[in-house]
Amino acid sequence: MTAEQQLVDAALRAWKLNADRVEKFFVALSADQLQQEVAPGRNRLIYLWGHLAAVNDGLFPLLGIGPRLHPELDPTFLASPDRAVATLPSASELKDIAAEIDRELWKAFSRLSATDWIAKHTAVSDEDFVREPHRNRFSVLLSRTSHMSFHHGQAILAKPRA
Amino acid sequence: MTAEQQLVDAALRAWKLNADRVEKFFVALSADQLQQEVAPGRNRLIYLWGHLAAVNDGLFPLLGIGPRLHPELDPTFLASPDRAVATLPSASELKDIAAEIDRELWKAFSRLSATDWIAKHTAVSDEDFVREPHRNRFSVLLSRTSHMSFHHGQAILAKPRA
């Protein structure tokens, strides 16, 4: 592997590690456990799970690697805070949706070269990208990896301790 | 910038963004506020702050970029859970310690080339590194960036809401 391939490989491994941890955490919970709040008055686990799925699904258009798989998540998990929408997907639906997003993102990520990763993402204009070349796909990948970690740190607070 | 420089630059920006967020969050809190728990029975804010400082300080030897600046943090913030050690540094001491670690790490990071980043870290042997070339400095940087985000996500739960 070239140096640039090794750098990309490290970031993809970091993504995968975090995505797998998140999936493993939520999949193990019962429908009742998913109703727990991470702290008093804060988001419920099921909301965090749906929120992470919705944000990650947004990477398809943002990185220009495909259409959204589940845009129906957004009104509930992105545009609204927890509890604003009464009807959420079931634990089993969310499990399938999140797994599909993870799987298809991973396939799409694996097809991108280092040159693709440092190319601009779709939310920046050609003009702005000349001035701000750091607004590239790779930065988005790193930022969404941190985003998973941010909410995973919250989610474990609700987990019943041994 | 070459492709590899751009990839490193993106990761350094992600590090800095998270380090700055963490510093800004904790520095704004009073000594009383730092005694708050992130959730009932969980870590206090002051413990998380010291824990992040200790873990980040560990990057000097782990990346082979210098000696520890504050090894005295470890018994309290790494080897022990919160409340196991009665006497903690004051908010003002911790502020100076954390700022110094951040500043010196940033200087050291800025001196490393892409080739340096994909070289092995000090916790892996030459022999293992041949088989596992992903155990490099860059992976450590990404993992410690996620670690900050993980605990930052927890810390904001304790912050009094507006």
Image (spheres, coloured by chain):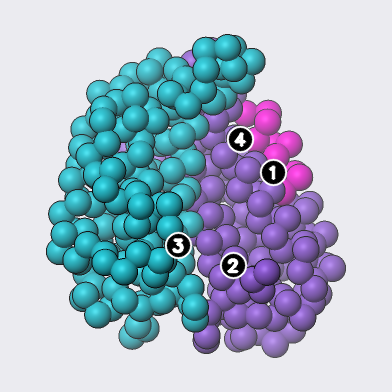
Chain colours: A cyan, B purple
Q: Which residue is mark 4?
A: B13
Judged from the image, the secondary structure of the residue bearing numbered disc 2 is helix
Q: Which residue is mark 3?
A: A81
Please report, as a chain letter, where disc 3 is located. A
Asked which quadrant contains residue A11, the reply is: top left
Mark 1 belongs to which amino acid? Leu
Q: CA distance from mark 4 to mark 1?
A: 13 Å
Q: CA distance from mark 3 to mark 1?
A: 37 Å
Tag nearer the camera, 4 or 1: 4
Q: Which residue is mark 1?
A: B105
**Contact (Cβ within 8 Å) of mark 3 with mark 4:** no
Q: CA distance from mark 1 to mark 2?
A: 22 Å
Query: What residue span does the magenta drawing correspond to?
Result: B102-112
Q: Residue at x 73, y 55 (%)?
A: B24
Q: Quadrant of the C terminus of chain A?
A: bottom left
Q: Is residue B63 left or right of residue A159?
A: right
Please report, as a chain letter, where disc 2 is located. B
Q: CA distance from mark 3 to mark 2?
A: 19 Å
Q: Find out whether residue B160 is within the magenta segment.
A: no
Q: Is residue B100 left or right of residue A18?
A: right
Q: Which residue is mark 2?
A: B155
Q: Residue at x 42, y 45 (%)?
A: A145
